[in-house]
Amino acid sequence: MANIEAVVEGLEPVQSELIQALHQTQAEFGWIPPEAVARIAKHLRVSESDVYGVLTFYKAFSLEPRGKHVVTVCSGTACHVRGAPRIVEEFERELKVSAGQTTPDREFTLETVNCVGACALGPIVIADGEYHGQAKTADIPKIVEGCRCRAQGRPDDKDR
């Protein structure tokens, strides 16, 4: 894994660099491959179980390949009572995967989180880092198409 070498070589070999190493690895690969865990642990002089402990604690890190586009639906209490379960179901229909999965073509990953801290905007969807507040099931196809358009450099309806 040549790219992981470039990631770890730029870091001081100390435990305090662990989260930075994981962020850089996630940015490089889109996930944290097992061989990267071993290399990070060796470079930072920590155990692999320490690396896995941090890796599994934070939702930002993934042990499985993720899609090019990540769609996150908040399922916290405020979003839940405002219809988040229906939003998740509609994304599952649109993308043909269950929450927590990635499409076979690795274009989209659909995930849910317990809270994003934007309760007044619920139900809220975050697609490729863009927040969509007070989401409705009718918005789902437009959100998905917006991700595809931006990936191809085309303006989506929001940009017009």
Image (tube, rainbow, N blue to C red):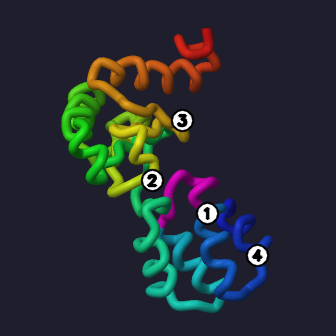
Task: Assess disc 4: are there few (<14), some (14-19) or many (≥20) residues with their C-alpha within 10 Å of its C-alpha.
Answer: some
Which residue position is annotated with label 3? 130
Q: Whole-Å distance between the Cαs marked 3 and 2?
A: 14 Å
Looking at marks 4 and 1 on the same chain, the residue that comes earlier in the sequence is marked by: 4
Q: Residue furthest front?
A: 120
Check disc 2 and give the amino acid type.
Gly
At x 27% / y 24%, what residue is drawn?
137
At x 38% / y 34%, what residue is drawn?
105
Check disc 4 and give the amino acid type.
Leu
Q: Whole-Å distance between the Cαs marked 4 and 3?
A: 30 Å
Q: Position of residue 46 (x, y in %)?
A: 58, 90
Looking at marks 1 and 3 on the same chain, the residue that comes earlier in the sequence is marked by: 1
Q: Is residue 12 above or below residue 21?
A: below
Which residue position is annotated with label 1? 23
**Residue at disc 1, secondary structure:** helix
Looking at marks 1 and 2 on the same chain, the residue that comes earlier in the sequence is marked by: 1
Residue extent of the magenta highlight: 26-33
Indicate which label's residue lies in the foreground, 4 or 2: 2
Which residue position is annotated with label 4? 11
Task: Assess disc 3: are there few (<14), some (14-19) or many (≥20) residues with their C-alpha within 10 Å of its C-alpha.
Answer: few
Indicate which label's residue lies in the foreground, 4 or 3: 3
Looking at marks 4 and 2 on the same chain, the residue that comes earlier in the sequence is marked by: 4
Query: In the drawing, does residue 130 fall left or right of residue 119?
Result: right
Which residue position is annotated with label 2? 117
Indicate which label's residue lies in the foreground, 1 or 3: 3
**Residue at disc 3, secondary structure:** strand
Q: Whole-Å distance between the Cαs marked 1 and 2?
A: 22 Å
